[in-house]
């Protein structure tokens, strides 16, 4: 016979839900979707999000001989992570104290919500296409530089931009702001309360999440192994192409030390305005997603697209062009993105009721589907509770988000 719903465990679940509502800083600011559970089951927990079209301009009165723009239907694949869980056991003695139940529920919510925010930060830290290397402490002007880089590329026009400062660089920004007497009350708040206002067009947040960009290994003399670029396509075989990334071939004595997460520039490859395709004069930055062939074959993001409506760089990577790595000291990142670039996509697991363990479900104001299941073993005198959530974190457009890494050398 199934256990009856224990009313005193409702308190634990209420604390669980309320904890989620109050503890998700970055998850509140990411774009959120909730794909249909049945469709996700049939698709192997992967779904595809369509990216915007881009077109080319033809100049002239008579364009009868012009070549039409080929529309490329581009998709971003998003796959759920394995479910995150917290498992708690309370014995019959502990169950006598309501404080045990409420505090264990709150602890579970805080831990799982922290995991969500941590994974958003980790995903952005690994895939952000704009990297700002700062030699010295983080300063107020660094966020303004991030805004300038985005604006020069035609990013975020009419969209909200968000900046998340790690605790240490938030402190540095507060100190920098506090030294600016002409800002009056803003400087006073920065000095007394470490409160930083919105910076450089960004809605600014302080986050307790810390994701480090580690130091690049001993990598010198790395060059591009043959001229390379990428042509967007709709399909690769039977699946949609992931146009956010490409394989880049490099050579050099120390390429075996290149690792996922590294950031680099390529000589004479600049970023362009994403709409009018003008050269910004600023080096395009790239991220290493994975390494193969002893370091010779790097899967990188963004892909280098040197021509056509989806062009993002001023030129192809030339054979023999030097590769310069940016991450020269292990330091925490500060993340920024424009609306729509980063997503938190939720799923729901089907825990059946009436088959032994009791199941309670809810959805928080952020849209997080929550499950608490529990059962009592009369032989051991223990109640086991499981708290579960299912989601995916994704950078849908690496060129629309970035990181600032201070205190580099």
Image (cartoon, helix red, strand yellow):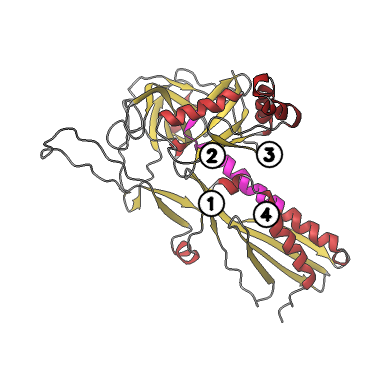
Kindly report the secondary structure that dominates the magenta region of the rendered protein. helix
* Sequence-wise first label, 1 or 2: 2
Front position among marks 2 and 4:
4
Sequence-earlier tag: 3 or 1: 3
Secondary structure type for disc 3: loop
Decide if residue 86 is in sight here: yes
- Judging depth in this view, the residue of 72 and 240 nearest the camera is 72
Towards the viewer: 286 or 218: 286
Q: Position of residue 381 (x, y in %)?
A: 84, 70
In the foreground, 159 or 275: 159
Instruction: Compare marks 1 and 4 and give the one earlier in the sequence.
Output: 4
Earlier in the chain: of badge 2 and badge 4, it is: 4
Residue wearing tag 1: 392
Residue at 68% of width from left, 19% of height from top? 181
Tell me the tag on residue 20. 4
Q: Which mark is residue 124?
A: 2
What range of the chain is rendered magenta? Answer: 110-131
Image coordinates for residue 66, horizontal then vertical, percent? 14, 38
Sequence order check, earlier mark of 2 and 3: 2
The answer to whether residue 216 is visible is no
Q: Give the structural element (helix, strand or loop) at label 4.
A: helix
Estimate the spatial distance between the alpha carbons at disc 4 and disc 3, rounded to whole Å. 16 Å
Residue at numbered disc 3: 208
| Quarter location, residue 266 | top left
Q: Residues within 10 Å of mark 3 (few under 14, many from 20)?
A: some
Circle 2 — which element? helix
Instruction: Please name which of the two marks, 3 or 1, marks the residue nearer to the observer.
Output: 3
Locate residue 273: give its quadrant: top left
């Amino acid at each position: 016979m199934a256990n009856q719903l224990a009313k005193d465990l409702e308190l634990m679940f209420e604390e669980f839900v309320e904890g989620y509502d109050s503890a998700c800083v970055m998850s509140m600011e990411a774009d959120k979707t909730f794909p249909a559970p049945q469709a996700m089951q049939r698709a192997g927990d992967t779904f595809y999000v369509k990216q915007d079209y881009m077109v080319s301009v033809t100049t002239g009165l008579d364009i009868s001989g012009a070549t039409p723009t080929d529309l490329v239907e581009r998709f971003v694949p998003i796959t759920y992570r394995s479910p995150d869980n917290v498992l708690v056991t309370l014995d019959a003695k502990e169950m006598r104290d309501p404080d045990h139940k409420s505090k264990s529920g709150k602890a579970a919510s805080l831990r799982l919500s922290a995991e969500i925010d941590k994974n958003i930060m980790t995903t952005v830290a690994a895939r952000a296409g704009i990297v700002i290397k700062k030699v010295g402490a983080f300063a107020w002007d660094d966020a303004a530089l991030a805004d300038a880089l985005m604006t020069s590329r035609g990013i975020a026009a009419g969209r909200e931009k968000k900046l998340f400062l790690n605790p240490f660089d938030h402190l540095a920004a507060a100190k920098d702001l506090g030294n600016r007497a002409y800002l009056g009350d803003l400087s006073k708040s920065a000095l007394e309360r470490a409160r930083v206002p919105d910076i450089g067009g960004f809605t600014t947040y302080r986050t307790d999440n810390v994701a480090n960009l580690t130091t690049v290994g001993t990598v010198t003399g790395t060059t591009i192994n043959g001229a390379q670029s990428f042509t967007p396509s709709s399909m690769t075989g039977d699946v949609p192409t992931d146009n956010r990334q490409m394989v880049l071939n490099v050579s050099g004595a120390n390429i075996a030390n290149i690792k996922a997460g590294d950031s680099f520039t390529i000589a004479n490859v600049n970023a362009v305005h994403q709409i009018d395709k003008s050269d910004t004069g600023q080096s395009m930055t790239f991220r290493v997603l994975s390494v193969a062939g002893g370091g010779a074959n790097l899967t990188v993001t963004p892909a280098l697209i040197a021509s056509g409506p989806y062009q993002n760089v001023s030129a192809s990577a030339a054979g023999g062009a030097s590769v310069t790595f940016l991450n020269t000291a292990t330091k925490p990142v500060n993340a920024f993105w424009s609306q729509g670039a980063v997503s938190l996509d939720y799923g729901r697991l089907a825990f059946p009721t009436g088959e032994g363990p009791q199941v309670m479900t809810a959805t928080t104001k952020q849209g997080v589907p929550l499950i608490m299941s529990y059962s009592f073993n009369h032989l051991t005198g223990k109640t086991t509770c499981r708290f579960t959530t299912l989601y995916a974190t994704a950078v849908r457009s690496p060129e629309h988000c970035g990181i600032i890494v201070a205190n580099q050398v």
